[in-house]
Image (cartoon, rainbow, N blue to C red):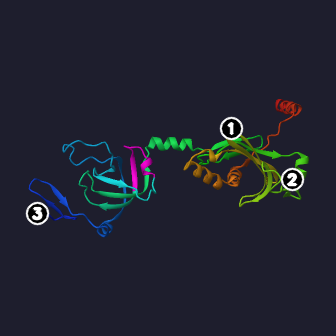
Amino acid sequence: MAAGFPILEIYPEQCVSDDGRHFTRKLSKEELAQMAVPAIMRGIFTCLPHLNSNAGPVTLECAYGLKAESGEYYALKDEARTSSLFTIAMEQEIEVRGTLYPGKSETYQSEGVIDVQEAYVIKTEEEEEEEVVEEEDVLFETDNYSFVAPSVNLDYTSLRDWQVSLIDEKEALLERVLDGQLVCRETAVDDNPNYSVSRITSDKAQYCLETASEGAAGSVYTEYSFYTLFSGDLIVIKFTAQYPQCYNYDDPEKTDCLAERESFSPQDIADEILATLIKKEIEIEIDDKEEEKELILEEEG
């Protein structure tokens, strides 16, 4: 400006020298904050191209950016580390949500900087269809019931051995049902760390829960047996959870594993199974002699 070169009427102000160089006034934090606007933008996650690739050797560093659907580039940052942006593979189509600070870069092709709060990979129709197929409910059938095994999103714990059984043995009924009410003989807390019986009440039902645990090969296997009354019958909902030894991991996996273990609720699993439970109609088999009589009656008339 002091040398008398022209000032472009844009914001922030730019000065252009005779040889074509651009000089941009750096904005203060207060000015940048005033320019900031909420932004939701889609495009390709990529490295920002340099403004002048012929000005000398180009280094291999990657300045993370978004090539928007309009064709313009924007620099991406995540100062608060609240998004999964930097776990996304390059050249994927993404949607970012955050705050846009307009302003051209002096080094890269960029119309501004987006401070990203959320980032999502945009899936194709084929990928979404495959995901729907993978997440379809799994239907289980036993002699007396059908039910759907819950779809549980767990990173460390695995569930298996789904069962729902009708309890019709007279001794078991006398032990667990009295005057149409569920009986639960709870164990003391310190009796046996690997086996316990406790009464649990949820919005769905009352349960008598038996848990039995054993360790093997770096994991703990716990079988959960939820006894409850369903349509006047005594049933038991069973499944097994395999818990890894979280302390075998280093952080942050160890912390994540312990947090998942703390938040996991077997009772919620039992409630979900109970909500899908359907009692089968018992087919009455016709005795051979009765079948013969029916055939004779049909032939006679």
Q: Residues within 10 Å of mark 1 (few under 14, many from 20)?
A: few
Q: Is residue 248 shown to the viewer in this render?
A: yes
| Magenta residue check for 78 | no
Q: Residues within 10 Å of mark 2 (few under 14, many from 20)?
A: some
Q: Quadrant of the C terminus?
A: top right
For marks 2 and 1, give the one nearer the viewer: 1
Question: At 13% across and 64% down in the image, what residue appears?
Answer: 7
Precedes in sequence: disc 1 or disc 3: 3
Distance, label 2 to label 1, CA atoms, is 35 Å
SS category of the residue bearing label 2: helix
Q: Quadrant of the N terminus?
A: bottom left
Foreground: 299 or 151? 151
Q: Which residue is mark 1?
A: 217
For marks 2 and 3, give the one nearer the viewer: 3
Q: Which mark is residue 6?
A: 3
Q: Which residue is mark 2?
A: 176
Asked whether, in this view, residue 252 is left or right of residue 241, the answer is: left
For marks 1 and 3, give the one nearer the viewer: 1
Q: Which residues are magenta?
A: 84-96
Asked whether, in this view, residue 299 is left or right of residue 63, the answer is: right
